[in-house]
Image (spheres, grey):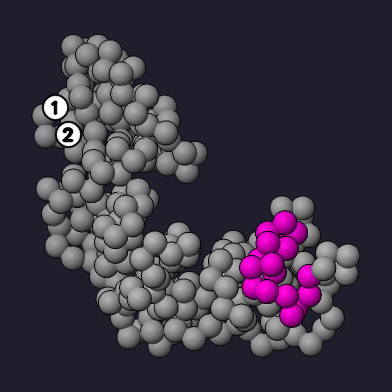
Amino acid sequence: MYKPEFLSLKCVALGLCLSLSQGMLATRALAFDPSAGVNKESRPFDLFKFGFLSYKEGRKDDAIEAYRYAAEKGHTGSRWALANMYADGDGVPENDLEAFKIYSEIASEGIEPGSEDTGFFANALIALAGYYTRGIPDSPVRADLSQARQLYFQAASTFGIPQAQFELARMMLSGEGGASNVHQAKKWLNRAQKNGHAGAMGLLGNIIFQEGQSARGLAMMTAALDNCSPKDRPWLQEMQEQAFSLASEKDRRSAVSMTAKMKGGVN
């Protein structure tokens, strides 16, 4: 069984045991529709499916209850779904510490090679890295940039997740959680942008621009801006506009022609 070898003792102490809050697996009657043929004694996957369909239909109370029973039976996907709901305050009061505990439990168990739980495991690593990047106020979870960088590295290298590759590169550029390494950061950004991460393309373009490849760097930033997610738009736009103001007219014209060719490679 694959185990995440570098999860720290801090992470283990805080999260190895799934500590669903008191009363989660409550004695109250299950709110499931009897006609659905699903109850707390059903198989974990059946509970998970019922929870997923309930969530899609807006019945979040049913979804949460189904996920909780499935999670108690060890179903990884249900644990992951519960953790997301706590992290987002989606159908339950927002509780980052509870989400952290559940993500940690998933990460501590590891996965079998080729397991259907691979996606849940990898995304739990990324969620934990995010918590270690910023910490959780009024809790034992403190910011630990070294731990965050290690977790991003595992998700980036073992599972090839573009977001993890991007976050790892950003930490390498700034020297967060370890030594600064521009050369390695560029490699991770290149991998991420080849996997469709627009933010990685823009950040790599900015590095290239600063290294003297003005037209190509500006083109990459422009293409990334045209394809980025809404949350990445503000910093990408600021970076692209600054580069545009510094570029020569010749480089701007060259960048325009390059941009059209690059857009097709970014999702």
- Residue 217 seen in render: yes
Indicate left or right for 252 with 76 as reference: left
Alpha carbon separation for disc pair 2 and 1: 6 Å
Q: Is residue 60 magenta?
A: no
Instruction: Give the residue displayed 52% in from the left and 75% down from the top.
Output: 102
Closer-to-camera residue (83/142): 83
Crowd rating for badge 1 (residues with CA inside 10 Å; few <14, some 14–19, many 20+): some
Q: Which residues lie in the magenta part?
A: 38-55
Pointer 2 with pointer 1, Cβ within 8 A:
yes
Instruction: Give the residue displayed 22% in from the left and 28% down from the top.
Output: 217
Asked if 45 appears above or below 40 in the picture, the reply is above
Indicate left or right for 32 with 200 as reference: right
Image spot of residue 22 (x, y percent):
66, 88
Residue holding disc 2: 208
Quadrant occupied by the C terminus: top left
Q: Amino acid at mark 1?
A: Gln
Instruction: State which tag comes first along the sequence, 2 or 1.
Output: 2
Instruction: Give the residue displayed 84% in from the left and 81% down from the top.
Output: 29
Indicate left or right for 263 with 124 as reference: left
SS for callout 1: loop
Crowd rating for badge 2 (residues with CA inside 10 Å; few <14, some 14–19, many 20+): some
Asked if 118 appears above or below 136 in the picture, the reply is above
Residue 148 lies in quadrant: bottom left
Indicate left or right for 222 with 94 as reference: left
Instruction: Please count the marks in the image.
Output: 2
Image spot of residue 152 (x, y percent):
31, 61
Quadrant occupied by the N terminus: bottom left
Closer-to-camera residue (254/24): 24
Q: Amino acid at mark 2?
A: Ile
